[in-house]
Image (spheres, rainbow, N blue to C red):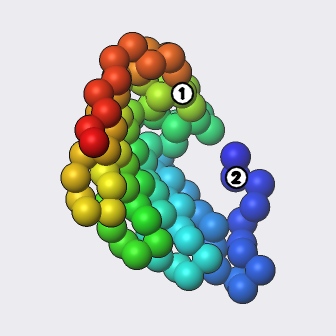
Amino acid sequence: MLEKRKYANGQDVYKLSGDRLTYFFKTGELKAFGDFIDEKMCGKWTFYRETGQLWQIGHFENNQKHGHFIRYNRQDEVEYDEEFDTGKIIKKKQNK
């Protein structure tokens, strides 16, 4: 998961500080952040579009979606509202 350390332009792909992993776009803008324990995504993760706009908030356990996951469209409206159990979707609500 952490194989690529730098983009071709020299920008860091990620920064690991304690148990917090932060990903960046090649422009240097924040891409995602969350807990990374025992080399696995866990707990709450927040994802952004390259514009800086919030895209998704979700929970992971052992690198798998687990718990509530919500995705926003470009108008900041809820696009998907889902519940997962160890990577498998158990409840899905799609807004139109």
Q: Is residue 15 visible?
A: no
Give above or below for 49 relative to 80.
below
Q: Is residue 59 above or below residue 89?
A: below
Q: Quadrant of the C terminus?
A: top left
Name above or below for residue 14 compared with residue 89.
below
Q: Earlier in the sequence, mark 2 or mark 1?
A: 2
Q: Which residue: 52% across, 21% down?
A: 87
Residue 63 or residue 70, whichever sits in front: 70
Please, what secondary structure does the residue beneath circle 2 have? loop
Depth order, front residue of 20/1 = 1
Mark 2 vs mark 1: give the one in front: 1
Q: In this view, does 15 lie to the left or right of 4?
A: left
- Structural distance between the alpha carbons of marks 2 and 1: 16 Å
- Looking at numbered disc 1 in the image, what kind of residue is underneath it? Gln
Residue 65 position in % (x across, y down): 47, 28
Residue depicted at x 77% and y 80%: 8
Q: In this view, does 11 lie to the left or right of 41?
A: right
**Image-quadrant location for residue 45:** top left
Question: Which residue is located at x 71 percent, y 72 percent?
Answer: 6
Mark 2 crowd level (few <14, some 14–19, many ≥20, 10 Å Cα): few
Instruction: Identify the residue under disc 1.
Output: 64
Q: Name the residue under label 2.
A: 2
Q: Is mark 1 on a helix, strand or loop?
A: strand
Q: Position of residue 37 (x, y in %)?
A: 52, 37
Camera sees residue 83: yes
User: At label 2, which amino acid type do we have?
Assistant: Leu
**In the image, residue 33 lies at what x, y percent?**
43, 54
